[in-house]
Each structure stands twice: as structure tokens, then as C-alpha cells.
Amino acid sequence: QPLHCAYRYKLQNRHRERIKVKNTASYMISKSSSTLLFSFISAAVGLDCTGNDALLQVKYNITEDVWNSTRPSNIYALPFLILQDNEQQQQQTEYSTFTDLVDIEKCLPRDECSTVVVAGLPTSTYDISFDGEHVEIGARFHYEEKNPITSTDVGTCIKHPPTCQDTEALVEVQFWSGQFSYRNNEFRIEDKHGDTILNGGSTSREYSSVIYSLNSTYACVARQNSCYTFLIGSGFEWNQGYSLPAYSLFFDGSLVHTNDSFQFDSAQFGDSCQPLCNQDNESLVELFLYDDDQFDFEYKWELKLLADDSSTPFASGEVSIGLNKSPLYHKTMCTPKQSCSSFLISAPAASGLNMPIYSLATDATIYREIQWYPGFNSQTPNNQTTTMGSCTVNGLCDVQTHDLFDLEVHTPAAYKFWDGRSSVMIPYGNVTWNFDYSDDEKRVPPISRSDALLSASHYISTAYKTGSSYRTIECVPKSKGNCDYSFNMTADSAVVSYAVKKNGVQLVNTQGVEGLIWKNHDSFMTKLLMTPFGQSCSPPNPSKRGLSAGSIAGIVIACLLVLCLLLCVITMCLKRSRREEQQNQRDEEDPLRETLL
């Protein structure tokens, strides 16, 4: 589908950081040779820093055997070093082989703050000194499965936390940008009244392209009789990069929470925090939304209780987006436990350029977490509805025309990428399911439908959290036959268990088959766990799945061609045999010709 110019421009801006990361890798390679040449010269003759400059030294004490034994299985996670000056200008050196590890020496201003970032090497294999004094390695973050990435300040690096009164405590948020820039994340701390007392990210500083940077934000808050909420969100769909954004939250000198894999996250701290809802008879509904668009914009949302005959929504709100406005929106609501609710979010009719990421959960069960494209085309309307809670077919659907589809998925407690790295997040493409026709012939959609009736990417397009629950509730059209539809999950999906219900009854007749499934708007044959959406259904014969009318016609044509070829060969052989017999007969009738021959 063609993109109009405005959308293309916005899409390029939104993904600029990913492009910048790739460009940085190319820059690192080109910069590597010049930096290494400088290092060879400095190691040979030594640097004599003058004036206000002091000597920075990074010395490696690693053998080739240790180098080889500490290399990760992923060859693309190469070690590197970054020198960042006070003006956030960076010089980068990449270490592709053991011979690239050459000691670094450079003169840096003594009264300014510089940062040394080292990635992909054991911290015991390098030493950092500045102005003749040893410098302890600073903050450490996840990089690959064996070695971290570290950030160490040298020079005059004075943090300026405020001096708090005796009745106050210091709150500090340390934020690591990773391979993304600081501006693509937003965090804040709210008091119990919802007022912001600290914020950081895109609205708190100028837009910056600096990657691999560590920043601290401080505030003095009341120590007693208080409760605070920390909120954070990212403008990028989570991906499995090698140095992701991370944060650490400190309160009164103690670590409260830390996370290096998140799309959205929150934490409460203080001495008077209470559960947000009455856990005996209420459920907690939580909404996150992130949109850093600079044009004034407004989303509207409402939450309805479907058992309530009132036309007034249970809760509603507006999300204002624009310049100098926080891109991070958060809302919590308490609904009656065991209730069925419907959440509707809408964008103005003239949208099509906004790409918000939003998450919706009830009692920690996630119902939707996607990057939404409202109004982009006919298949992405300006509104979206999500059903949550304890719903029945009679209370939610028209029982004459629809059945109730209810799916609950549980992810494993631990997950590892193909290269061995552990992760608390699972790429969304590693959990693939859809609800569609059982017959592959009907699964090949017309032009008007570019996906399955329901699929995992409709509800989760960011990432799955380990040890979490996900749920989808939808009214689906009744089938003409009892077993026209089926639920299909790829056999290698990263789930520990799942349950499919039709009208409240769990379906258990699941079998492994070879079948067609949709993924990323494309279809392919793979091993599936297929659950017929009906009673006493038998999955189609695997040998017959995937044989479309075109495939059968092709097989018939091929068989006819082979048959014609065999007939031609037999005819030629018969003709040749007849010619030989005629020749032998003539030879017997003419002895003189045989003698001459």
C-alpha cells in the first residue's frame, strides 16, 4: 500500500533512531582504523599532556585464550569502546579481533567531564586511569549473555543532587539510554494526588542523538506519610537489541526498582502506599499510552460496564498530545470484580499520521499492547475496542449470529534468544496464533482481507513479558457447520500453556497438523497445534491440508505431461523396432547385398 508523503516523513522521523544506530555501526568501523592508528602511536611514544589536559589511559590485560572463551555466540555483538566528551561528541572503536585490542591513551580536559563506555569485555580485563590515578569502573548494564556494557566518568564530574531537609528524602532516577537516544523515553514520578514532582526524558531536555549515555535526575520529597508512583514508557516498540534502555530508581539511598527490558513500567514506593483497588471486590484496570507527536492532537477513550444498562460510561478521558506536552499517559480504574467491560479508544477522523503505542490490562492480565495506526487505511479505523473481564456469550454477543471466543495464554518464566542471551521479554513474533477457517481453501483471503479473522498481532505487537498472562475476548460469527473455524498456534510458540473457550466451554481436542497460518500479513505452511472451534470435531487430514484447487490442477497437468512423454517414448521405440525388422527381412531376401556389406 502506497504511503502518502506526510506519513512517509513521519515514519522516517519515528524510525530515525534505528537508522542512526545502524549508521553508528558503520561509523564505528570507519573510525576504528584511525583511532587504532592513534593508539599505536601513543603506545609507542607516550602522550605528554600539557596545560589543563590530563592523560586518560585504558589498558587491556586479556590473553587471546580469554578473548576466545568470552566471545558470545552472536558474532554481531562485538566489543567496542566509546569516548564521550563534555559536549557529547563521541569517538568509537570496534574490536573485531583480538589483535584490535590496543591500549588507548588520550589527553582530555581536567576540569570537564568525559565518559568512557566499554562493551562486550569482562570488567576484569581492562583498567581505566585518569591523571595518573586509577578509576573504578562505573555503572554496568546488560549487553550480551557473557559480558556487560559499562559507563565510567572521568575528569570533573560533579553531580548536583539537591540538599534535602531532615524531613525529606532524596529520590534519584538513573536512566541509561542504551543504543537509543535519551529523547525516545519518558519517565516521571507522581505524588498521591497525581501531581508530577520529577520528570525526565523527551520533555525535560533538548532532543539529543547521543546514545550510550547515563543521566541522573533528582528531587527532594517528603519521607513520611507519603506514597509515590514512578511511571516510564518508550516510544519504540521493544526489540531484542544488545543494549536496551534501562533505569534504576532510588529512594532515600535505597534501590526501589530497576529494569532493562520494558515497554511500559510502574512502581510505587513510600511508607503509606496502599493497594489501588479493594482486592476483595474490585479489579484494577491500567492504561498506558505513548505518543511523542509534536502536533496538537487529542485521543478520547471510555470504559463501559456491559452489565450496566446506563448509557453513561463507567470512566472516560482525553489524552492531549503536542509540543511541550508529556508523551506518556497513564490511568488506573477500579471496576467491580467479575464484571465484563468494554474499552473504546478513538482518534480524530483526520488522523492517519499518529502511531501511538498503548497497553491495556486488567488485574495484570494484558489484553492489548500494540502500536496503533488509526485512520491509516480501511483496515485500521479511527477507533478500537477491547473487551476485558468475566464475559458471557449472552451478556456480550448476539447469540443468534455470534459465538464467544475466549483465549488465555501464559508465557514461560524464563526465555532465551537463539544466541543464548536471557531475556524477560519475548519478541511478539515468537508467539503466533490465529483464529480462522479450518479449511485451508477458505483461509486464502480475498483482496478485501489481508489477515486472519483474528491473530496474535492484532493484540500484541510489542513484546510478551515472561511469567505473564494474556487474554483475548471477541464475538465471532457463527459458522454454518459445527466445525468451520479453528484456533491455530504454531508448535514452536514461546508459551507454557494456553486455553481456548467457546461460549465458556474449554475446547480440548487439539492435534498437531501441517497447516496454513498468517503472520505479519503473509501466510505460510508450518506445524500447528489446531483446536477445532466446535464440539466433536476432527482436524482435517494433514495430508490434505494445503492442497488448493490450483495445486490439484498443477498435479493433474504434470501427470498428463508425464503420460504424454511416456507415450512418445513408447511410440519411438516401436517405430525403431519395426525399422530393424524390415531391414533384417530385406537382408535375408538379398544374399548378394549381405556379401557386399
Image (cartoon, helix red, strand yellow):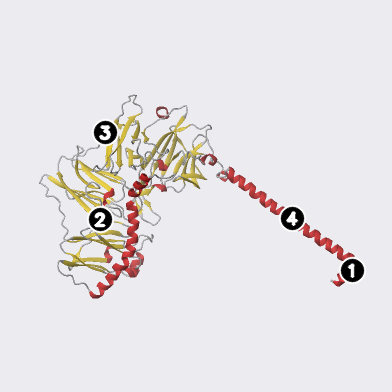
Q: Residues within 10 Å of mark 2 (few under 14, many from 20)?
A: some
Q: Nearer the viewer, mark 1 or mark 3?
A: 1
The quadrant of the rendering that contains the C terminus is bottom right
Disc 2, disc 4: CB below 8 Å? no
Q: Earlier in the sequence, mark 1 or mark 3?
A: 3
Q: Which residue is mark 1?
A: 591
Q: Position of residue 532 (x, y in %)?
A: 50, 38
Which disc number belongs to residue 213?
A: 2
Q: Nearer the viewer, residue 280 or 292?
A: 292
Disc 2, disc 1: CB below 8 Å? no
Q: Residues within 10 Å of mark 1 (few under 14, many from 20)?
A: few
Q: Residues within 10 Å of mark 4 (few under 14, many from 20)?
A: few
Which amino acid lies under the numbered mark 1 shown in the image of this protein? Pro
CA distance separating discs 4 and 1: 33 Å
Q: Which residue is mark 3?
A: 278
Q: Which residue is mark 4?
A: 570
Q: Nearer the viewer, mark 4 or mark 1?
A: 1
CA distance separating discs 1 and 3: 118 Å
